Image (cartoon, rainbow, N blue to C red):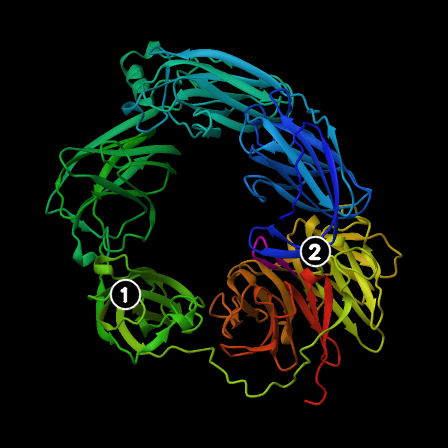
């Protein structure tokens, strides 16, 4: 907003200026720029300053580390309406709006809106709809901690504003606890990285006692970089994951360990203080804060922490063997055994299929059966000389050298400092495991040693791997200008990719390798049953491209016998032609058969519309500017029209007035039928409703109470208390099918949910493919049409189908007749024509199903951010013209 006024220089001065202006007010939002026309405005400003004596405001947690100087103003007004608040000054400010109450130590409760730099020069801007009877606060703080300086807060709105300074001292007492200690060369050792015997970390353990349930913040202050772990009940230094609750290295401010954790007074917790790097020593302090006191009690070397726990297991094992009487009496450790096996890989060793295809890369390998007698966690690693880097795989029961994914459990490669493998795995007794040792590069040979340790570890027994017969097939072909076109990138109409499709024939279920060879960089896609060139995500199983040798694709995929699969080969870049070869290999591969791809959408010629509408609208509701009177609206969103023999009414979600309005046809004023009791979360209040529908069977209205994240039901007879039907849902719109199933679009989780109205059991109808779904329409046979706003398209789901298809806007964001831009409301007529509010294009489009292109119904010269549309019995169109705060009616041309 650009307004001309003079700024006072004295601290704590108030200036009120009344101006009548008609200027555009430009508000910065996350994704759009909204232009509003300001009318009579009163400008109020107050100058103040933040100093080191100012109150502190907890904008981030923990409060003791992130406190900003702040000043709070209670906002008193005499006229309800939209108000604009911003600051001027040399400091970079941050502003937040609260309602009812505010607590300096709890920055999230009652907070509605915050802004950092919505105005010029690093100043905040808040645009809020205020009620004269509500209690509101504005907190002025700074973007950066510890900043002081003067500022002027400026408010503009229908009436003058009283900025009343308020004390926001915390009502919650935060208790600080501190303990100082030191790590030396005589401190206990802790196994923070594996293997334990390669890295020495000094550590100290503390039992934590708290007096009050709650969230506590624990951090270190030290000249050395610290690392911390919190455990439940006990800690074993050689198995750091057992009983582990939380671990942390350092935060970005202090470069020290800090963790937030909920603690209970009846439970035992152990904090381990250690270092980020091996062999580091030095003093440190532990600082704890929370609702109660924290007591840090240093633990002994044995006892409840686990006997002799701060020594490595393998070192402890040596002590036990050489001098058993030195072990503590209360040894709580499980017996730990270690086994080594020395061997070598040679050119006579078995070959193993590490990388595909197997026939191009030779890896020598040896397999070992692992023998254990006790359930538990085991550690396996290797040691070798020279440049032979070892990798390892573990299998269940058996291993096939040519089919490395069958019975596969886990693998490890090069994660130890010596470029050897290191693996931690839980094993069960009475189960056969096979360890395969091979190399990180082909054709390497040389000696190696295996090391295994864990509870009652037995030995390594060499075994042979099996080898499944492997069949291979090749097919050479060519992409030309006459090849089929494939929609590999969006929008399809801007990028031409030539492609060829092949049916894949296999007779044995298993893992198969499919790749390309040639000079032309390629992409490959595998589909189930069929492929649609204009909707390339449908039935897609796997894809890969440009990351195999010579910029070729390679796909590893599980294929089943008696199932039809289609491979599509296309180019990496548009309009590229050339030769290629595809190679398939696997347990029983039988070749490629060229097939044609389908095309579900086509370009249509709209020679004549079935109906036409007058292009000049009639404003039937609103049109008197932003307001909350019975003939005004404030950013309406959803619309619902009933036009039958019993009733002719229009229902509107009057979003920023937090109410649902009803207009009887041909009347100039509406009546509130839900909400209208100010913004709030009581059962008799609404918060920014976006949509509603009429349930005639229950004589009620079901409302998407978007700001309260709930679905509510209000009686149209006003004889029952409003009821919360569904909570914790980020709804945007509603629809109901013939079976009385309620559909809800969750625009944050990007899903469509269905609830039976009688029992409210939830079913996830659409769980993928969507980005910011908004409005819906239930068509024939309970098909669900969804506005996929973030993808600029309309998706249709048929009942009992697993995925939907694009029926409008398949080519991405744009203004042409093949594209949409953040579409909103939709309506489907009896001929399956789709009418769409093309939001960012400010127009109404019609799409015949099966067409790639649509046609213009109503142009965009008369809308400002339209949201929803519907029809009456005479096929007149009603449009929600949101930012003009009105409903527009377009009459059908009866002479057409």
The spot of residue 130 in percent (x, y) is: 75, 45
Residue farthest left in this picture: 347
At 54% from the left edge and 77% from the top edge, which residue is drawn? 854
The residue at which mark 2 appears reads as 22
Q: Quadrant of residue 274?
A: top left
Residue 887 vertical position relative to residue 45 in the rendered view, above or below: below
The spot of residue 107 in percent (x, y) is: 64, 33
What span is in magenta?
Answer: 744-752
Residue farthest bottom in this picture: 895
Residue 617 vertical position relative to residue 158 in the rendered view, above or below: below
Say whether residue 603 is left or right of residue 472. Answer: right
The residue at which mark 1 appears reads as 522
The spot of residue 222 in percent (x, y) is: 43, 17
Residue 249 vertical position relative to residue 840 in the rendered view, above or below: above
Residue 211 belongs to magenta span: no
Compare residues 615 and 547 and report the one nearer the observer: 615
Residue 233 visible, this angle: no
Q: Quadrant of residue 549?
A: bottom left
At 76% from the left edge and 64% from the top edge, which residue is drawn? 623
Q: Secondary structure at mark 1?
A: strand
Q: Secondary structure at mark 2?
A: loop
How far apart in space, not on screen, are marks 1 and 2 (Cα)?
59 Å
At 57% from the left edge and 15% from the top edge, which residue is drawn? 177
The spot of residue 133 in percent (x, y) is: 82, 42
Q: Quadrant of residue 463?
A: top left
Compare residues 57 and 220 and report the one nearer the observer: 57
């Amino acid at each position: 907003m650009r307004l001309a006024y003079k700024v006072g220089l004295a601290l704590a001065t108030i200036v009120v200026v009344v101006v009548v202006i008609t200027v555009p007010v430009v508000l910065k939002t996350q994704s759009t720029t909204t232009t509003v026309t300001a009318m009579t405005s009163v400008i109020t400003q107050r100058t103040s300053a933040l100093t080191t004596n100012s109150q502190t405001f907890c904008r981030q947690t923990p409060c003791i580390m992130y406190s900003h100087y702040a000043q709070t103003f209670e906002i008193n007004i005499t006229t309800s309406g939209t108000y604009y608040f911003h600051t001027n000054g040399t400091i970079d400010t941050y502003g937040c709006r609260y309602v009812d109450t505010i607590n300096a130590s709890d920055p999230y409760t009652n907070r509605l809106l915050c802004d950092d730099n919505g105005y010029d020069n690093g100043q905040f801007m808040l645009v809020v709809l205020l009620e004269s009877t509500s209690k509101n606060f504005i907190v002025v703080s700074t973007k950066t901690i510890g900043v002081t300086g003067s500022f002027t807060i400026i408010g503009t709105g229908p009436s003058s504003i009283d900025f009343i300074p308020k004390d926001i001292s915390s009502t919650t007492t935060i208790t600080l606890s501190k303990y100082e200690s030191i790590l030396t060369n005589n401190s206990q050792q802790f196994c923070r990285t594996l293997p334990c015997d390669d890295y020495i970390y000094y550590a100290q353990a503390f039992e934590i006692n708290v007096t009050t349930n709650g969230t506590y913040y624990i951090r270190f202050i030290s000249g050395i970089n610290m690392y911390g772990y919190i455990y439940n009940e006990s800690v074993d230094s050689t198995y750091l994951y057992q009983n582990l609750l939380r671990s942390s290295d350092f935060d970005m401010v202090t470069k020290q360990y800090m963790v937030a954790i909920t603690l209970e007074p009846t439970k035992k917790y152990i904090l381990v203080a250690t270092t980020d790097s091996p062999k580091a020593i030095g003093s440190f302090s532990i600082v704890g804060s929370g609702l109660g006191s924290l007591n840090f009690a240093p633990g002994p070397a044995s006892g409840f922490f686990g006997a002799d726990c701060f020594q490595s297991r393998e070192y402890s094992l040596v002590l036990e063997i050489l001098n058993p009487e030195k072990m503590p009496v209360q040894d709580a450790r499980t017996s730990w055994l270690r086994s080594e096996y020395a061997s070598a890989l040679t050119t006579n060793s078995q070959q193993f299929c590490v990388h595909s295809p197997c026939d191009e890369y030779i890896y020598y390998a040896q397999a070992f059966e692992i023998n254990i007698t006790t359930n538990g966690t085991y550690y396996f690693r290797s040691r070798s000389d020279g440049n032979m880097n070892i990798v390892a795989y573990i299998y269940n029961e058996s291993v096939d050298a040519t089919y490395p994914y069958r019975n596969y459990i886990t693998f490890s490669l090069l994660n130890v400092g010596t470029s050897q493998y290191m693996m931690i795995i839980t094993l069960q007794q009475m189960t056969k495991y096979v360890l395969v040792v091979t190399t990180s590069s082909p054709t390497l040979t040389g000696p190696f040693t295996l090391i295994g340790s864990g509870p009652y570890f037995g030995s390594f027994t060499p075994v042979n791997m099996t080898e499944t017969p492997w069949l291979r097939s090749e097919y050479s072909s060519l992409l030309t200008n006459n090849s089929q076109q494939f929609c590999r990138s969006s929008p399809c109409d801007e990028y031409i990719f030539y492609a060829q499709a092949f049916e894949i024939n296999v007779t044995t279920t298993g893992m198969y390798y499919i790749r390309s060879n040639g000079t032309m960089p390629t992409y490959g896609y595998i589909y189930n049953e069929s492929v649609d060139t204009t909707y390339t995500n449908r039935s897609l199983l796997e894809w890969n491209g440009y990351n195999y040798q010579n910029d070729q694709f390679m796909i590893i995929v599980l294929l089943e016998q008696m199932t039809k699969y289609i491979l599509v080969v296309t180019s990496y870049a548009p309009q590229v032609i050339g030769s290629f070869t595809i190679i398939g290999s696997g347990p029983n591969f039988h070749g490629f058969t060229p097939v044609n791809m389908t095309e579900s959408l086509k370009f249509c010629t709209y020679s004549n519309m079935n109906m036409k509408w007058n292009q000049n609208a009639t404003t039937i509701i609103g049109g008197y500017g932003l307001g909350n009177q019975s003939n005004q609206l404030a950013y309406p969103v959803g619309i619902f029209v009933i036009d039958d023999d019993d009733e002719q009414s229009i229902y509107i979600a009057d979003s920023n007035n937090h109410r649902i309005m009803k207009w009887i046809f041909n009347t100039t004023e509406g009546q509130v039928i839900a909400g209208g009791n100010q913004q709030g979360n009581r059962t008799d209040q609404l918060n920014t409703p976006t949509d509603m529908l009429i349930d005639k069977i229950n004589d009620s209205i079901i409302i998407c109470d978007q700001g309260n994240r709930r679905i509510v039901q209000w009686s149209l007879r006003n004889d029952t208390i409003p009821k919360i039907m569904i909570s914790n849902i980020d709804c945007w719109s509603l629809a109901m099918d013939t079976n009385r199933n309620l559909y809800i679009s969750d625009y944050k989780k990007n899903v469509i949910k269905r609830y039976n109205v009688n029992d409210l059991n939830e079913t996830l109808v659409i769980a993928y493919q969507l980005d910011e779904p908004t409005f819906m329409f239930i068509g024939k046979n309970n098909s669900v049409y969804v506005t996929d706003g973030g993808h600029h398209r309309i998706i249709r789901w048929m009942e009992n189908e697993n995925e939907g298809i694009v029926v409008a806007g398949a080519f991405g964001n744009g203004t042409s007749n093949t594209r949409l831009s953040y579409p909103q409301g939709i309506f489907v007529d009896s001929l399956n024509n789709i009418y769409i509010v093309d939001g960012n294009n400010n127009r109404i489009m019609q799409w015949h199903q099966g067409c790639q292109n649509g046609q213009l119904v109503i142009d965009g010269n008369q809308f400002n951010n339209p949201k929803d549309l519907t029809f009456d019995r005479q096929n007149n169109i009603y449009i929600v013209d949101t930012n003009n705060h009105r409903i527009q009616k377009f009459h059908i041309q009866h002479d057409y």
